[in-house]
Amino acid sequence: MSDLYYVSSSPHIKSDKTVSSVMRDVIIALTPAMLGAVLFFSFRALVIIAVSVLSCVLFEFLYDVIFKKTRTINDLSAVVTGILLGFNMPVTVPIYLPVIGAAFAIIVVKMLYGGLGKNIANPALCGRIFLFLSFSSYMTTWIDASTAVNNTAFSLPLFSNVDVVSSATPLSYLKNADASIVSSVPISSAFIGTVGGCLGETSAILLIIGGLYLLYKRVITWHIPVSYLATVAVITFIFPNMTGITRLQFMSYNLLCGGLMLGAIFMATDYATSPVTPKGRIIYGIGCGLLTVFIRYFGGYPEGVSFAILLMNFLTWFIDKHTIPTKFGGESKYAKLFKKAKE
Amino acid sequence: MKTKMLEQIKSRYFYIRLLSFAVLVMSFIPFCNPITGYGGTQNSSLVTIIKNIGSVINYFSAEIPQFSSYSNVLFIMVILLYVALIGILFGFLLLFSHDKSYRQHGKNSILYAAAVMTVVFLVLCVLYFNINLAMYKFGSQAVYRKLLIIFRIPVFLIIYTLISAAILVLSALEKGFNFSDIKYRIKSDLSHRFKGGVHVPYNKVTQTMPIETLAPAKVMIYPLSQHIGAACQSLVKPGDLVKIGQKIADTDAFVSAPIHATVSGKVLKVDYAPHPTLNSCQAIYVENDFEDSTHESLKLTHTDYRELSNEQLISIIRQAGITGMGGASFPTHVKIQSALKDNIDMLIINASECEPYLSNDNRIILENKDELIEGINILRQIFGLKNAYIGIESNKPKAIKVLNKATHKTGIRVVVLRAKYPQGGEKQLIKAVCNRKVPSGKLPSSVGCCIFNVDTVCAVYRAVVTGVPVMRRIVTVAGDGVENPRNLNVRLGTPFSNVLEACGLKEDTKEIIMGGPMMGVSQYSLEAPVIKSTSGLLCFTDKETQNDENASCIRCGGCVSACPMNLTPNYIAMYTKLRDFDSCEKLNASDCIECGCCSFTCPAKIPLVQYMRLAKQNVIENRKRQVNKN
């Protein structure tokens, strides 16, 4: 009887957390924003997100089959990438665009590097940038969420190209430095999401709800979102780039408009491409914030979030290497330096 | 009839039902307008809401204004959504409760609310197709305003915090006016804390079960190595007769402790036997004659321990074979002697028992508190200290109460700590009790602390006051594979099979663990005996044994934030895979305490502790090699 027992190394119990449960939590956290996208931009939004998710899962499955790898679609990470990629598109894009983006994100950025956890850049983000550079006209045609609901929501065709009068996002108003147009968009609507922009990025409140859920579930830590948002807030408050509106207003627009909330809560916190040490996460968040503001102030594009996060992604391992936490009961690097200097 | 009603009132859910109804009623407040008696308020400041409370009555009496059918649906949906939000918040509040059934209710509440929310959102989506009509009839502004009601959460958060406080107080009242639960929780939150650690499911089923005595087995096995340090040599030969309390094995080495017979009978043989932690080891087999005759050495040579010198006390402790009962089994007299060389000002008693399932220390406190206090007095005499500290986790309110009463005006302080694994780790406990950090690679005495386990202190008491050496051990037998989980008073040397027989081992048991589930050792044979460091025997079935396939690291950083020693297990595991032990050394792999937090928390189920052990071993070997070279 005795030789039938199972012998293993401690610990003998493990938490319920698995890779797929983590990804499931991320999907749950993205649901409010997804429902918001459907509410603000009609059902076409749902179709775009669905196409993006399906093609992400399909490409990962095909890659696994063709290169004879173990099937990895069960960990749901492709679904998360799909939703995030869909969130990064305007409602008016042709329906084949998410498919191209998914192919680039999954095959080139994720699978060729070795799959989940080994990619050096966020797949959804790279997919977005790829589409943004290749199909810039499609990717920058915004319609206002309220106009979408009022006039065109039901007439947006699913499978043919959409011809609508494009409006700009509040961010592009900021770029043009036109105070009168900027203040025509109330901050409250930017907070709730009834402004122009990509599908998932308009509603700050729904994204924040998702972020709070992730924090509650301990899927993400506070370090990256807080340091990212705080950096943007502080710089835009102290050095506003515009006259005609108050500092507080300028800061609020910068925080609530564009992809900042989506980027800070869901994109920058992507596990594989962010540092693992607490100190490193804060440095990473501050770096993202600085780059975002600099691109918004001095760059050619109105939006800087995706490029900022992508640039910081490449620094992840470097940051990690230099922010290894001081061991319990050990001396910190600075204490050692101080001692040396004293000697 | 009357008693039934009383029962219902007494039942724990009554208040919750009452309160949830109150919440429902209150949730109508924002929709009520004093003038129309219906519809959204212009601004949702607290003052307006208080003003509007009176209009709840208005809501029922006033004429319902005309609505278009769409906006009616919209309105109902918004109300439903609101109710669902309440349900979710309410559920989340209940999730923090101590009571399992409350948590279940919380989960149910969230599930139902989520279902309602989904339906509502679907209906809202459909509605938005036709919203133009509603806007035409009702004016777009008003429709949006109604939607905005959803976002007026802050005001209601205040209401909910008040309600949740009320629920906590009421639930405390129900349990016989017992506020200690909450008090200890708050107290523990105010205490010092260590970084990292994980919240494990405690599963302390045996916490309320009294200690029962187990009869000794026919053949008892005494392994010659039951402690850290040199193994003992047998003092008896096959065929010798031994009596209870007779020293049967000892050695001259400094770091060691003698072993005593716990039954009377004949020595059968000295042979290899399965060992709970060392695989196999030389052991003395004694056949029990069930006469229980005691050996003459059990007599006391002194009348009052207060007259004894430190040397005498330490030699008594050495002769009684006392080792640390927490699990590491380090000889106690060695610990005391090395601690006396340093300047000790903190005597800490470890009662935290952070390992899940185990409840032996808790029972010892509840049943033998006088032994414990007297044992602490002996230790205080040795170190010449007026004070002592007992560190205990907040999830044992009964034991805390008992200790508080027993230590009143004795100079012993009970420090309530947070229920977090590994609170009982030496360095973590010191950090939590007195906020001192033990430097890496040094002993607790370097910061003036000395730690003893509860059972060790009791053993010291027994050795010094009654003259009985270490002969028994309180063992918690628990897990799904056991029919009657309980706390047993077991004589050392009893084979595991006898212990488990008494508790009813189920057939589907898959894994048997000596110690706690986080740091215990799985057993390959039930012939292994209970030794001085056996604190529990856990029998896990398929349900509890997790043998997940491990995925690749997703770099979530969970292990880094869980590590109580502030290491980076993911990188150490990576370098170990590459066999780059120099990098492991740079990452301080040798500081790992093998607590298992990283493996527990890893979502990819990577056996990080095993990698850490490998790295640790190699780093230490490399160091030795370099020292030899130089």
Image: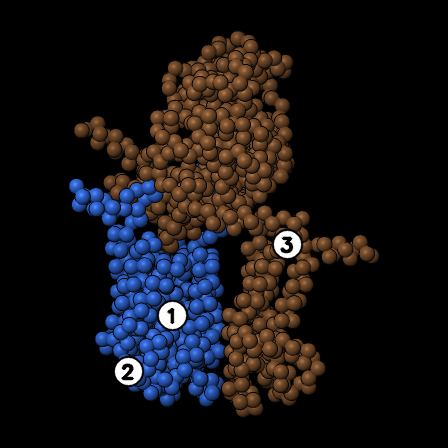
Residue B216 image point, x, y percent: 60, 21
Colour displayed for chain A in the image of the structure: blue
Residue B371 image point, x, y percent: 56, 28
User: In this rendering, is residue A271 above or below B233?
Assistant: below
Which chain is depicted brown? B
How many residues crowd around disc 1 within 10 Å: few (fewer than 14), some, or many (20 or more)? Answer: many
What residue is disc 2 on?
A: A243
- Residue name at image x 52 percent, y 30 percent: B455
Distance of mark 1 from mark 3, alpha carbons?
A: 40 Å
Circle number at residue B171: 3
Q: Chain of mark 2?
A: A
Quadrant in the rendering for residue A252? bottom left
User: In this rendering, is residue B16 above or below B186?
Assistant: below
Is circle 2 on the same chain as circle 3? no
Which of the image's four quarters has the C terminus of chain B? top left
**Can residue B497 be seen here?**
no
Say what amino acid the circle numbered 3 marks. Ser
How many residues crowd around disc 3 within 10 Å: few (fewer than 14), some, or many (20 or more)? Answer: many
Say what amino acid the circle numbered 1 marks. Met
Circle number at residue B610: none
User: In this rendering, is residue B112 above or below B122?
Assistant: above
